[in-house]
């Protein structure tokens, strides 16, 4: 049994919709009431990331994938819930206390054109974190380390004096990965690192990430839209919908036997070359805007199997026989 | 050492630089403006070497020589541009005046820029209440006329310390007054660019690395907001020189023993209608050309550092 590296329990995040201080007051039944609208991006996420695994998070736009990533990295403060790194709680730490975990956890961003500082050369970009986290290193050692890092991500060390705009998208994403690896982390959050790249370059970056995982025993939290990448890359997959995780399963199990109605619809939407597969399941309606904390199952409005219980009670993650776990009343009641 | 040159690297990359250079060569007006500005700077720096008379000489100020017309009128080549009402050689006085005006302008803008950049960065990056507070301060500062604040402040200083002390400290006080009164211009512009830069992922990446706010603000965000700073910098120098000239003209600036361009104009103004027009007109023309060159430079920089406005 692999040991859990990151444990997330009951994570919630609500963003206040920007309203001016005065605009928060509403006149209601003869009284002024303070009212602040908010968007509930995460509604109680429970997730465990094991050492050395790749956990892919899939889901449609706006379901809270990036919010989850940013909450884990401490870029935003969660409204409720806990995040543990090994056995230490890290979600409520100050910047100073968090410093220790900054080295252990790193992030690769979505847009390779914005994630590197345009006014810093590759050398400067890599030198800064290395010196910052290892002030005892001599300049020669730092230079050596930078050269090694660049070579290891397939960028020639001689181009370290160039600025980011002189590189292609794929090269930049590899430089971003080198920056993340520069502090020798054991956990990397990748927030759609491939979405801005074209397919051949995606494969390069993906293979590089897999090589690094093998080399350094890294764990990934990999956020993506692309189910083909998931099938190729993931150890386990978490399917998110509207700020909750609705299914968590090992990759093979998920792709062969999707259980949650949303997962089924999602997987049936993958275009296949063979023509004998079933028609894609069409979901009706749109994702609701989560201005209120949802009551019942988040998928109720679009689920063809919803009954009264789904409207009243939110389903818990229930472990299945095949090591997957699903949050769905229909599955629990064996209706599905 | 392998990487010794790296830290000296210009923040503008090569291609950007060459783009600016080619644009510069194409623009005759910009070249002319830069040459004029460089000429002024050079002359101001070398004033003690260039001037035909020594300002510290006792004979420099000789009332016997007062109000001599420029050489092309009198055919007397002792005083190339004539003399002023105190009998000083006008060329010498103008060279020293330019030196003073430029020093005051540049130092005042340095103060403005330092204050404005720090306040703008903090307001933009930290946001929230600090942002609100600092920007309201800027609004209040801007709602006063700068000239009015300067006049009141200078008048108070004059009456508090007496004229003698004031004349000694005039330059420092002028720099402070002009420098402290116009920081909101810098602060607002910087804040606007910081708000845009803050959204970029490289800032998040720096935060994930654990860098402190100060480091992120000055090392990561500031270099990316340099172009607007450069533009305001040039235009503000022109404004500061004008402000100094205006204050001197009103009698609140540099003393007549150590005149800046503004003080010279003011002094010459009273002799204007007695026929000695050159005491006023020649320093005015000097000032106007300097301001024009600065503004042309600023305009050109704005066009070329901002690709959206840039037109071929």
Image: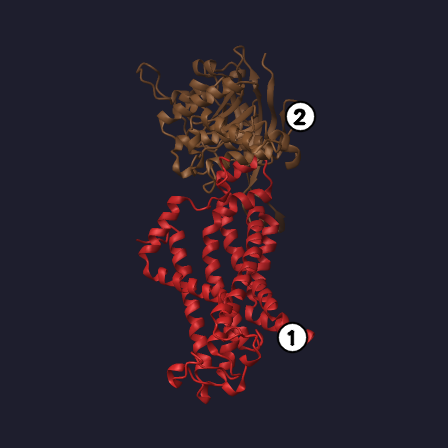
Chain colours: A brown, B red
Question: Marks 2 and 1: which is nearer the front?
Answer: 1
Residue B210 percent location from the top left of the image: 59, 35
Of residues A333 and A211, the one nearer the viewer is A211
Extreme residue toward the right, this view = B160
Q: Residues within 10 Å of mark 1 (few under 14, many from 20)?
A: some
Q: Which residue is mark 1?
A: B158
Q: In this picture, is B154 found above or below A64?
A: below
Residue B144 percent location from the top left of the image: 57, 67
Question: Which mark is drawn over residue A289?
Answer: none
Instruction: Give me the chain letter of mark 1.
Output: B
Q: Secondary structure at mark 2?
A: strand
Q: Are marks 2 and 1 on the same chain?
A: no
Residue A266 visible to an observer of this rendering: no
Extreme residue toward the bottom, this view = B274
Residue B180: name its quadrant: bottom right
Q: Residues within 10 Å of mark 2 (few under 14, many from 20)?
A: few
Left or right of A67 in this view: A232: left
How many numbered discs, if any?
Answer: 2
Residue B31: name its quadrant: bottom left
Instruction: Give me the chain letter of mark 2.
Output: A
Residue B27 percent location from the top left of the image: 33, 58
Q: Which residue is mark 2?
A: A88
Label 2, label 1: how far apart the Cα atoms are: 65 Å
Left or right of A244 in this view: A88: right
């Amino acid at each position: 049994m692999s040991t859990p590296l990151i444990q997330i329990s009951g994570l919630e995040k609500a963003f206040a919709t920007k309203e001016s201080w005065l605009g928060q007051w509403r006149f209601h039944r003869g009284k002024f009431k303070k009212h602040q609208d908010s968007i509930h991006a995460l509604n109680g996420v429970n997730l465990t990331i094991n050492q050395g695994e790749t956990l892919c998070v899939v889901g449609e736009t706006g379901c809270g994938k990036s919010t989850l990533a940013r909450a884990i990295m401490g870029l935003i403060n969660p409204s409720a819930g806990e995040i543990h790194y090994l056995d230490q709680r890290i979600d409520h730490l100050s910047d100073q206390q968090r410093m220790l975990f900054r080295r252990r956890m790193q992030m690769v961003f979505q847009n390779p054109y914005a994630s590197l500082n345009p006014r810093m050369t590759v050398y400067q970009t890599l030198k800064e974190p290395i010196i910052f986290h290892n002030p005892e290193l001599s300049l020669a050692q730092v230079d050596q380390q930078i050269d090694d890092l660049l070579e290891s991500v397939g960028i020639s060390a001689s181009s370290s004096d160039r600025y980011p705009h002189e590189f292609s998208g794929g090269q930049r994403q590899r430089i971003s990965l080198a920056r993340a690896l520069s502090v020798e982390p054991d956990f990397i959050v990748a927030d759609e690192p491939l979405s801005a790249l074209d397919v051949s370059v995606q494969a390069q970056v993906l293979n590089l990430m897999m090589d690094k995982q093998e080399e350094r025993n890294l764990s990934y939290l990999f956020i993506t839209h692309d189910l083909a990448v998931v099938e190729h890359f993931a150890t386990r997959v978490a399917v998110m919908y509207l700020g909750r995780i609705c299914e968590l399963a090992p990759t093979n199990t998920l792709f062969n036997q999707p259980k949650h109605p949303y997962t089924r619809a999602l997987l049936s939407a993958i275009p296949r070359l063979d023509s004998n597969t079933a028609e894609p399941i069409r979901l009706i309606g749109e994702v609701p805007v989560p201005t209120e904390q949802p009551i019942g199952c988040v998928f109720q409005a679009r689920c063809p199997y919803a009954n009264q219980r789904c409207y009243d009670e939110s389903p818990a993650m229930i472990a299945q026989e095949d090591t997957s776990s699903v949050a769905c009343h229909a599955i629990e009641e064996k209706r599905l | 050492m392998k990487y010794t040159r790296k830290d000296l690297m210009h923040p503008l990359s090569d291609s950007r630089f060459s783009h600016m250079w080619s644009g510069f060569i194409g623009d005759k007006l910009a070249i002319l403006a830069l040459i004029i500005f460089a000429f002024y700077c050079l002359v101001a720096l070398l004033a003690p070497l260039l001037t035909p008379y020594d300002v510290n000489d006792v004979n420099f100020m000789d009332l016997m020589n007062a109000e001599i017309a420029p050489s092309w009128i009198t055919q007397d080549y002792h005083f190339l541009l004539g003399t002023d009402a105190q009998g000083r050689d006008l060329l010498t006085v103008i060279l020293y005046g330019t030196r003073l005006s430029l020093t005051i302008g540049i130092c005042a803008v340095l103060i403005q820029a330092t204050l404005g950049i720090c306040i703008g960065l903090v307001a933009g990056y930290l946001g929230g209440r600090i942002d609100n507070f600092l920007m309201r301060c800027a609004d209040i500062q801007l709602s006063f006329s700068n000239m009015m604040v300067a006049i009141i402040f200078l008048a108070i200083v004059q009456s508090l310390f007496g004229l003698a002390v004031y004349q000694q400290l005039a330059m420092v006080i002028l720099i402070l007054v002009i420098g402290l009164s116009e920081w909101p211009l810098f602060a607002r512009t910087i804040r606007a660019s910081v708000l845009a830069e803050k959204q970029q992922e490289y800032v998040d990446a720096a935060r994930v690395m654990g860098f402190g706010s100060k480091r992120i603000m000055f090392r990561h965000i500031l270099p990316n907001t340099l172009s607007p700073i450069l533009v305001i910098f040039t235009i503000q120098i022109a404004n500061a020189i004008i402000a100094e000239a205006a204050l001197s003209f009103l009698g609140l600036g540099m003393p007549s023993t150590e005149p800046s361009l503004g003080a010279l104009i003011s002094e010459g103004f009273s002799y204007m209608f007695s026929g000695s027009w050159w005491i006023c007109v020649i320093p005015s023309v000097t000032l106007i050309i300097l301001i024009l060159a600065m503004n042309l430079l600023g305009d050109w920089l704005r066009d070329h550092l901002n690709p959206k406005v840039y037109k071929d």
